[in-house]
Image: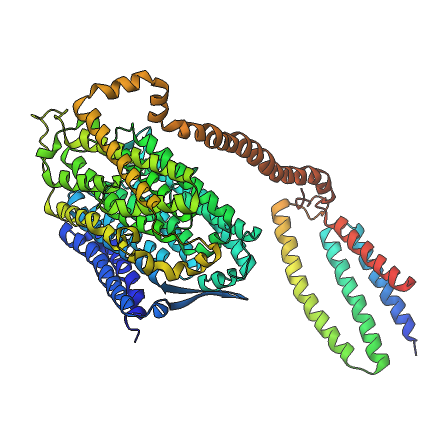
Amino acid sequence: MIPLNFYLILSAFMFCVGVLGVLVRRNAIIVFMSIELMLNSVNLSLIAFASFLGDPTGQMLVFFVMTVAAAEAAVGLAIVIALFRNKQTVNIDEINILKW
Amino acid sequence: MVTMFSYVGFIVLFPLLGFLVLGLFGARMKSEKLIGIIGSSTVVLSFLLGASIFAEMLSLPVSARSHIVKQFSWIAAGNFSVDFAFQVDQLSILMTLIVTGVGSLIHIYSIGYMHGDKGFWRFFTYLNLFIVAMLTLVLADNFLVMFVGWEGVGLCSYLLIGFWYDKNFEKGTTGDAAKKAFIVNRIGDFGFLLGMFLIFATFGSLNFDTVFSAATVFTRGDTTITWIALLLFVGATGKSAQIPLYVWLPDAMAGPTPVSALIHAATMVTAGIYMVARSSILFALSPVAMDVVAIIGALTALYAATIGLVQNDIKKVLAYSTISQLGYMFLGLGVGAFAAGLFHVMTHAFFKALLFLGSGSVIHAMHEEQDIQKMGGLKKYMPTTYLTFLIAAIAISGIPPFAGFFSKDEILWKAFSDGSPLLWCVGALGAGLTAFYMFRLVSLTFEGSPRFDEHHLHPHEAPKTMTIPLIVLAGLSIIGGFIGIPESLGGGNRFEQFLSPVFAAADSKMLLPYHDVTATEYILMAVSVAIAAAGIYFARKIYLERTEIAGQTANRFPGIYKLLLNKYFVDEIYDASVVTPIEKGSEKLLWKRIDVGLIDGLINFTAKGTEYASQFFRRVETGVVQSYAIAFVAGILFILGWLIAR
């Protein structure tokens, strides 16, 4: 059986990749995918804990996260499309009007 | 078996109802008659009720004559509580009768005088409100309710002085005169307020009963009591037009003449005397305050009389005469003759109201002409006015057996015996001047030959609503003094005896010696009558027979004449020393420097400071979402690191 730590390390790694993706990538779609990655890394650790502790609460929470993530994906993609229609780009460096 | 006393609230309620009805519906009432009847009948009802309470009081033994009738609890906060309560005793019922009695007559007179005025209903509304306030003042059982009335009469005075607000008066408008009266009174009110604060701080209450009975334990000459008395007296100098705050009263003549008669001669201006008499125990405990009252009173009496000598406006002469007579009342109070002071309040109310109403009748007949140089010979046109005016003039001059003789002589005698011969001299001199200027007025107005164009101007006698009050007041001016005939003339002074329980505490503190009837009293009496008679004689001589003397005297002493004609330049001195500095100071310093510079400057400084600071700090907001995200992550890492390292 694979020890719990392996799952957690993988989860932390995926999370860090997600964070870095959000911080450094310029394409809005990629940033968006990175956010999904972060959510799924959390899902992984939740599943791992649920399985190791024999507690189904973790699995239940995962369903919540997936539901919210689906809703977020719908709203987020709609925003990206609206953004593209207005500015003809999804490069978030160029989308900086929220300032002084 | 106290029955009528409990109805004392209605005395105030009737005029209040009149005020409300006229104030709310008066503008829609077409008939002057209806307005006049509503306005007058409420005051007459109050007078009848007051008279029945007075009658019942007379039937009661002396110990049962004072009652407090609580209307409702007004303020209760911690250990401070004030009831809206009326004190019915000898002093307040006397004042009530004067206010409502003279007030009713003047209301009736006003129906004729104000006929055809576009503000007819407004006039009666204000008059009724004035009666309400004045009755509240005299019936109050504590200083605060008294102060409510005190301010109320001040307000009505303001409203009525400026009644003809679109009319010019001297250098400005009647509105300026009204404001002057109100503001000068405020200075006095400030003293009154401070006095009240000090009373509450010292006695813990504002109730007359509580304060005055607590005051009896103080020794004579106590500093706190002296301060209280002096501060209250500052209030009295404002309301009762004494030096140095008298300047508003001559200008108050801008109002309609019945107002001058009611408010600025007979009732409101005596509020200060009433207040000092009501607080007699506080004054009696302070010899200093008493001396101040007596000296200010005597000085005002003489000072105002000298100005009255040369004035040419019929109402101005009467105004200065009022100030002078008020001075006599304070002189009486100041030497401890409280009852004599109030006696003069009463007789003065009769004859001075009569003089003003008579002058109103003259002004009416002369079509708003007030300059006595342009009158003369009016007695054949208006005999009733002439006769009543003459009676009042004799009364105020102090010729026996008219009312003014008894009250003025009582004051002068007390000033001599309980004060000092000097006070008597000042008072007697003032009395001589009074007789002189009153008969100068009578001679120039009613006698001699007319100095106006008889073909164009046809003076006429006033209507009945105006002459009847004149006749009633003339009757009172003749017989009013008989209730206070002094012992020396075989009278026993019933007026003083009636009031004596109110002043018993004060008398016991002052320990004035009892004076037997002596030859001195008769001599002084004869001297003061002789002085008055001399004044009358010279006035008639100069202004009827040797008319050139007046002009010659003025030419021989141009300095003094100018000084008197310009009222000692006091208005100019006040303007230069108080009004202008305050006005300029307010404009140049308070407005342009403090308000615009400092206060606005501070606010603008805050705004500008924020703006400059944000020029720098707003650069932090790049608008790039990722830079914000970096801040998030850095924050989380910091918290995590801190939690781990802890």
- Position of the N terminus of chain B by quadrant: bottom left
* Residue A19 in picture, x, y percent from top left: 81, 57
Front residue (pair B64, B487)? B487
The residue positioned 76% from the left and 53% from the top of the image is: B629
Q: Is residue B621 left or right of residue A44?
A: left
Asked whether, in this view, residue B311 is left or right of residue B369, the answer is right
Can you say which quadrant of the picture contains the C terminus of chain B? bottom right
Q: Outermost residue toward the bottom?
A: A54
Farthest residue in the front direction? B519
Query: What residue lies at 64% left-to-right and 45% top-to-bottom?
Result: A88
Q: Position of residue B499 (x, y in %)?
A: 34, 59
Q: Of B147 and B524, which appears nearest the observer?
A: B524
Residue B88 location, quadrant: bottom left
Coloring applied to the structure = rainbow
B473 or B12: which is nearer to us? B473
Q: Position of residue B294 (x, y in %)?
A: 43, 43
In percent of the image, x 22 and y 39: which residue is there?
Answer: B393
Q: Where residue B173 sits in the image (x, y, percent)?
A: 31, 33
Labels in figure, total: 0
* Residue at the farthest left position: B455
Residue at figure coordinates x 38%, y 44% from the top left = B240
Does residue B505 show up? yes
Q: Is residue A71 above or below residue B283?
A: below
